[in-house]
Image (cartoon, rainbow, N blue to C red):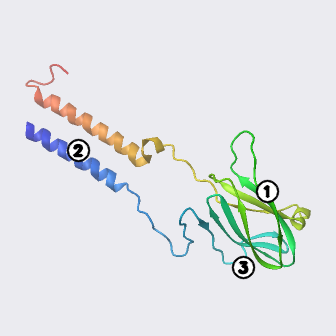
Amino acid sequence: MNRILSFSLVVAVALTMGMGAATVPIAAQEDPGNASNQDNETAVETTDDYMQEIDSETRITDWEYQPGMFTIEIETDSETKVSMTEAGDFEEGTGNFNYQETELDEGSNTVTMPVTDRQGAGIAIATRRSLQQETGAFVSVGTAESNPFRTFGGESGLFTGVIMTTGLAALGAAYVIRSEKNGVIEA
């Protein structure tokens, strides 16, 4: 009887460990065609000469985000002034945001814009010409969806716990049935 119980316990532990190992995500699977994300940086590649048009003479050619700071490459056909304001996911209530105006020279310009480091950080960019056209551009890191099972260790933790609990309950029931001489007398 003790051998059966010991064997069943070893099998239950092995299955539990096997389920946990099967759900470990494999990190660093990158597609060589995509940009890499390192140290919470976001880089974007496109096949065009520019990524986003601000107005007919001003374009965003590249951008990067590091916690609390956007670095943007802006190309312009003539000297112009850009206005940038913090945008993105704001919490409910009131608060402050960053704003800056920068003079750009003709050609390529690198502009840095501080932002509040939060999920969904972004900035909105406009020029006089874009405002006359009633448009503008934005750059955003986007938002990551939160996992409702995060408290339980994600989906793998939740399902592993449910399966392990069910297996151990079945093992306990099997032990009670086998330990009684004539079936279950008292449980």
Q: Secondary structure at mark 3?
A: loop
Q: Are marks 1 and 2 in contact (CB under 8 Å)?
A: no
Q: Earlier in the sequence, mark 2 or mark 3?
A: 2
Label 3: how many residues lie within 10 Å, few (<14), some (14-19) or many (20+)?
few
Closer to the observer: label 2 or label 3? Answer: 3
Q: Disc number at residue 146?
A: none
Does residue 152 appear left or right of residue 146 in this picture?
A: left
Q: Residues within 10 Å of mark 2 (few under 14, many from 20)?
A: some
* First in sequence: mark 1 vs mark 2: 2
**Residue wearing tag 3:** 49
Instruction: Please report the residue visible at 28 percent of the width from the left and 50 percent of the height from the top.
Output: 17
Residue at image coords 54%, 64%: 39
Q: What element does badge 2 sit on?
A: helix
Q: Amino acid at mark 2?
A: Ala
Identify the residue position indicated by label 1 in the image. 99
Q: Nearer the viewer, residue 119 or 103?
A: 103
User: Which of the two discs, 3 and 1, labels the residue nearer the N terminus?
Assistant: 3
Residue 63, quarter of the rendered image: bottom right
Q: Which residue is mark 2?
A: 12
Residue type, label 3: Asp
Which residue is painted at 64% across and 59% down in the image?
Answer: 141
CA gap, disc 3 to disc 1? Answer: 27 Å
- Rounded to the nearest angstrom, the CA distance separating label 1 from label 2 is 59 Å
Q: Quadrant of the C terminus?
A: top left
